[in-house]
Image (cartoon, helix red, strand yellow):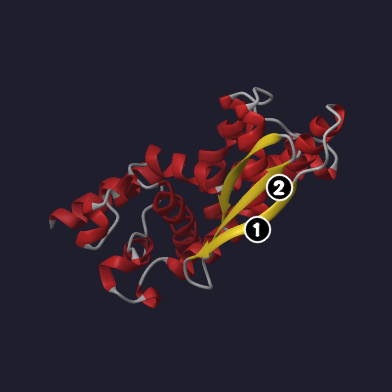
Amino acid sequence: MSDRSSTLGALEARIGHRFADRALLELALTHTSAVGNAAESYQRMEFLGDRVLALTVAGMVYRAYPQADEGELARRLNALVKRETCAEVARDLNLGEVVRLGSGEAQSGGRSKTAILGDIAEALIAAIHLDAGFETAAAFVERHWQERMISARGPLRDAKTTLQEWLQGRGLAAPTYRQVSRSGPDHDPLFTISVDIAGLEGALGTGRSKREAEQNAATSVLAREGLWKDADVRG
């Protein structure tokens, strides 16, 4: 047995699923930098895995919090499917050790980058889904996200709304948001948004969408002002 085959076998044991088509697992672990072609990397799988993850987690929070309204359910969902949470799961499974990276990406610390690890976790969900169906993929998600759902301690209110209400309570004008930059390919953009506040220092936030970047900018202000603790921001 080759070293790579042995490594993938150990990963399957950690995942709790043995692939009928191991090529799917290999594809889920292949970064664009390793092949130079997005179509031969995990990018398409990441797209599918993101949807499988969201649907599964939506069902989990719906069942776990029968008294929660739509807004609370959405905030719980968003906290559980965000890139940082996916990266935590990837670290638990040591996915960074087995991902295929180009030499440049590997030398720049790609195996520990939150962005890459989060994407790999989603691609892995898609690989399981394609290999064994939705129920098997959902079971994987439940095993690795259930405890995070139960132990989540973060604020359940929207960061932008919380910031605006806090500013109004201090007699300050509502904050304004402006796009500072956009980078990355069209299918996977990264936005940087600035929140500007009259009479108070603003902050920057980044995200895959403008909305996510705005929320992260507002969160930075709330954390800096001591309104949300670090643990709350991670939640």
Is 88 or 53 nearer to us in this picture? Answer: 88
Residue 158 image point, x, y percent: 75, 40
Mark identifier at residue 165: none
Label 1 secondary element: helix
Q: CA distance from mark 1 to mark 2?
A: 26 Å
Q: Is 32 left or right of 185, judged from the image as shown?
A: left
Residue that carries the numbered disc 2 in the rendered image: 59
Q: Residue at x 27, y 72 (%)?
A: 35
In the image, is residue 187 above or below residue 111? below
Q: Is 30 left or right of 67, judged from the image as shown?
A: left
Question: Residue type at mark 1?
Answer: Lys
Residue 151 image point, x, y percent: 61, 26
Q: Quadrant of residue 135?
A: bottom right
Is 175 or 53 nearer to us in this picture? Answer: 175
Q: Nearer the viewer, mark 1 or mark 2?
A: 1
Residue that carries the numbered disc 1 in the rendered image: 210
Q: Is 228 left or right of 50, judged from the image as shown?
A: right
